[in-house]
Image (cartoon, rainbow, N blue to C red):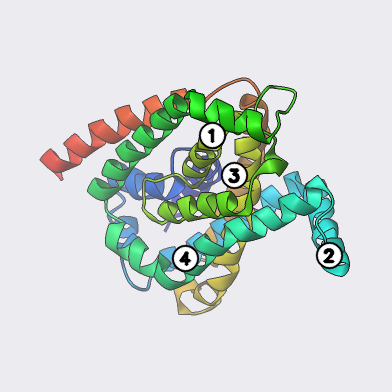
Amino acid sequence: MTYLQAILLGLLQGVTELFPVSSLGHSVILPKLLGWSDVVAAQSADESYFLAFLVGLHVATALALVIFYWRTWLDIVRGVLTSLATRRIETSTQRLGWLLIVGTIPAGLVGIAFEHSFRTLFANPIAAAGFLFINGIVLATAEVYRRRAAVRALAVDHGLNPEGARRLDTLEFREAGVVGVAQVFALLAGISRSGITMAAGLARGLDHEDAARFSFLLATPVILAAGVYKLPDLLGPNGQGVIGQVLVGSVVAGIAAYVSVRFLTRYFTTRTLTPFAVYCLVVGGTLLVWFSLFG
């Protein structure tokens, strides 16, 4: 892997991990389009330097999210510890903390058991393009479904925020679990973690701002845990010869992730998933045809 490749892949990871367009899907597709045959081969190999490279990118992305939300995370940790001591959930912050814990469990368990298998099985351009197209369908469907009367009634029943949508702290624990299960599908290259969890949040009556906030907070421990769990790949034989590239790519990914989450938290205060749905449908559909015809 060259340093230019590391920089481009780091930038791609930092942006597409948070934008609802799938970082894994783009990291599979871009090397194929640019003719990086060594990187393409390494992505689907059982053991390769690319595993070590991904560890660095994931840790950097998670740290960027922690830095951006550091005050929120400090309040959440305090709230959870306090609720453990009192054995009661009394504040919205305490409830948010436990909702995040419940939502993290499904993706954490499935990721530990099947992440490697899913990555090697579906890390090919045709599958990634197909799942990217499906991701577009999911985003578009969420925008249509959230306007249903049943979803609006759900929001009214559980209390509205100033924008007229359901308050984040009114989610039930089973609903947080459902959002967490949705996050599992991000193991498929082409399915966006932030996109599918936002879609699940919108379906439960949240507005785009709270759905994005919950998605980014929920992604942080999962991405960080995945990176820490895979540290042996970085520190072992897979990391030999690419430590410099990992460091450079990780710095770029971390900066890109911070800028992305800063932009998206503002973007979703007034805007929707529709542009990202259109992007995924057009790009995924076009590349699916292209790779099917020309390999």
> Would you name the residue on which mark 1 appears?
202
Of callouts 2 and 4, the N-terminal one: 2
Q: Residues within 10 Å of mark 4 (few under 14, many from 20)?
A: many
Residue pointed to by mark 2: 81
Q: Which residue is drawn at 82% across and 67% down?
A: 84
Q: Which amino acid does label 3 sit on?
A: Ser
- Closer-to-camera residue (72/25): 72
- Looking at the figure, which quarter contains the C terminus? top left
Of the image marks 2 and 3, the number of the one nearer the N terminus:
2
Residue occupied by mark 3: 215
Q: Report the residue at 57% width, 28% height from top.
A: 153
Q: How far apart, in angstroms, are the residues tagged by discs 4 and 3?
A: 17 Å
Q: Mark 4 points at which residue?
A: 111
N-terminal of the pair, mark 3 or mark 1, is 1
Could you tell which of marks 1 and 2 lies nearer the N-terminus? 2
Helix, strand or loop at label 2? It is helix
Label 3: few (<14), some (14–19) or many (≥20) C-alpha neighbours in 10 Å:
many
Give the image location of residue 10, x and y in percent: 52, 49
How far apart marks 3 and 1 lie (CA) works out to 11 Å
Foreground disc of the pair 2, 4 = 2
Q: Nearer the viewer, mark 3 or mark 1?
A: 1
Q: Residue 126 carries which label?
A: none
Look at the picture and state if 284 lies above or below 93: above
User: What type is the residue that disc 1 sits on?
Assistant: Leu
